[in-house]
Image: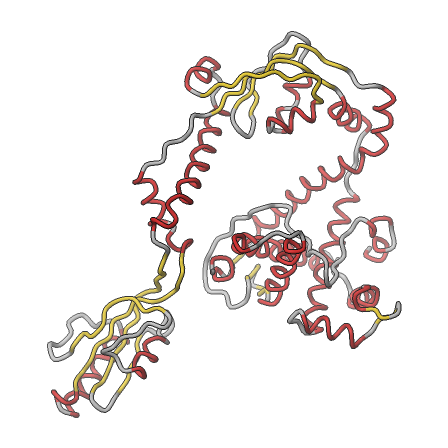
Amino acid sequence: MFTKISGSKWKNIVLFITVFTFVATSLVAVLVYKFSGEVSGAAEVNGKEIPIYEFNYTYEMMARNLQNQNIDITAFKKEIAKQAMDTIIENELIYQQAEKEGLLATKEQVKEEILNIPAFQSNGKFDKNLYLQIVNSLGLTPEAFENLLQKQLTVNHVKAILLSSIYVSDEEIETFTKKQLTKISGDVTLIKPKEPVISEQMIKDYYEKHKNDYATQQGKKVEIYKIDINKLGQEKAENLAKDLFTKAKSGSLTNVPPEVEKVFDGELYQNTKLENIPSEVLSEVESLSKDKKVSFSKTPSAYYIGIYKEDVVKSKPIEEIKSEITQKLKREEYQKAVENLHKTTDITALLNNNNVEKSTVSDMTIQEFVVKYGIKSNELNNITNLKVGQTSKPISTDEGVLIFKLSQITEPDKGKMEEMKKSIEPLIKTQKFADLYQMYIDNLKKKANIKINKRLVEGE
């Protein structure tokens, strides 16, 4: 099947990976995954680990693509990381499904693709030294790059198969073309929610719940106990230290003897200096984690027991990000209000309880009208089925609810209709493919067990 596809017209449609081009990104902007368990790689899909290099490479290609468009990515690093994570998980889901169906790209196809990538050619021929040099500069081994390429070729083949299954009818082309060329005039009543009021308490609650999103440093909460050899004597201090260490290891340290001094109880971050703690002891304590919860250190004058309590983060002060949080909450509250408007069928209530903006449109194509007001695709018939003089029922938009009274309709010129029909099929196919692809991915996700390395998408 692959051989047939790669030699067909679909090869011109499918995106093939190259060194300096943008890695194919997700058609689903943001996917939500369950965060569970510890992952040593970038992610784990149905028990199979996605290596870190795959995430790094995808992230780098996405970042480079934006930078080539003169976009400063400083403020978007987390978003790029999430997009990269979405992409590698989607690709892995498709790859695993293709493997079950016997649709994997072969090693021979990978080799052929590498030989034909212009970036690896010198004077029109494949240059092995150039290939190794470029791959190494990307932080990849040849094996890693070839694994990436095999997966991308497989994904592209699956996409080509999905695309080839799409059929566009003459009726669809007729409807789509009319939407592009038919012009309408009339009165618009746009009903929008009132500006949401964000209280100080809402800001504070959001900040407390999302502190990790504004972390500047990661650290750990620990306790450090000191058993003084000079005060207690070597034997007593040693026995007390061993007993304390054993109880701490077993989690049964409840009552600390009065001879033991708690010298630190707080949060440790990178480069934290503690004047009353020897550097070698602090070094041991800094190595504590969920997997190593107790440390034991000895200096000439004392024994020290360190106990890990939990991971912590140091976040930006709320005053620094208050404006950012306020704007975010306003957007969220506004969107909730819009969704509530969509559920309301009482026109009188809509008009009385919200902001109302009235305007007129003149000789605007239906497509322009839909784009301008953010009308949902499933609401389109409420516009196209109107007759002159009729008023639509409430129509859901991105900003609220719209009511339209049609005063004039101008049918498109037949010559222009026929001319546009010639080029309209690929556009409809693209729309249909996006819907089909999303359904395909959503179905794979429902059946999958997905874990991700949260550090990669939540880190600074």
Quarter of the image where one finds residue 235: bottom left
Q: Is residue 116 above or below residue 279?
A: above
Considering depth in this image, is 448 or 242 the residue closer to the camera?
A: 242
Q: Position of residue 446 (x, y in %)?
A: 56, 48
In the rendered view, does 257 fall on the left or right side of 386? Answer: left
Q: Position of residue 82 (x, y in %)?
A: 54, 54
Q: Is residue 452 above or below residue 174?
A: below
In the rendered view, does 18 fall on the left or right side of 247? Answer: right
In the rendered view, does 211 fall on the left or right side of 432? Answer: left
**Residue placed farthest to the front in the image?**
70
Q: Is residue 246 visible?
A: no
Q: Is residue 282 visible?
A: yes
Q: Position of residue 64 (x, y in %)?
A: 65, 58
Question: The N terminus appears in which quarter of the rendering?
Answer: bottom right
Quarter of the image where one finds residue 180: top right
Considering depth in this image, is 343 or 312 the residue closer to the camera?
A: 312
Q: How many marks?
A: 0
Considering depth in this image, is 324 or 280 the residue closer to the camera?
A: 324
Residue ID at (43%, 25%): 194
Residue ID at (70%, 26%): 367
Q: Is residue 100 above or below residue 436?
A: below
Residue ID at (71%, 71%): 135
User: How is the protein colored in the picture?
Assistant: secondary structure
Q: Position of residue 201 (x, y in %)?
A: 30, 40
Quarter of the image where one finds residue 439: top right
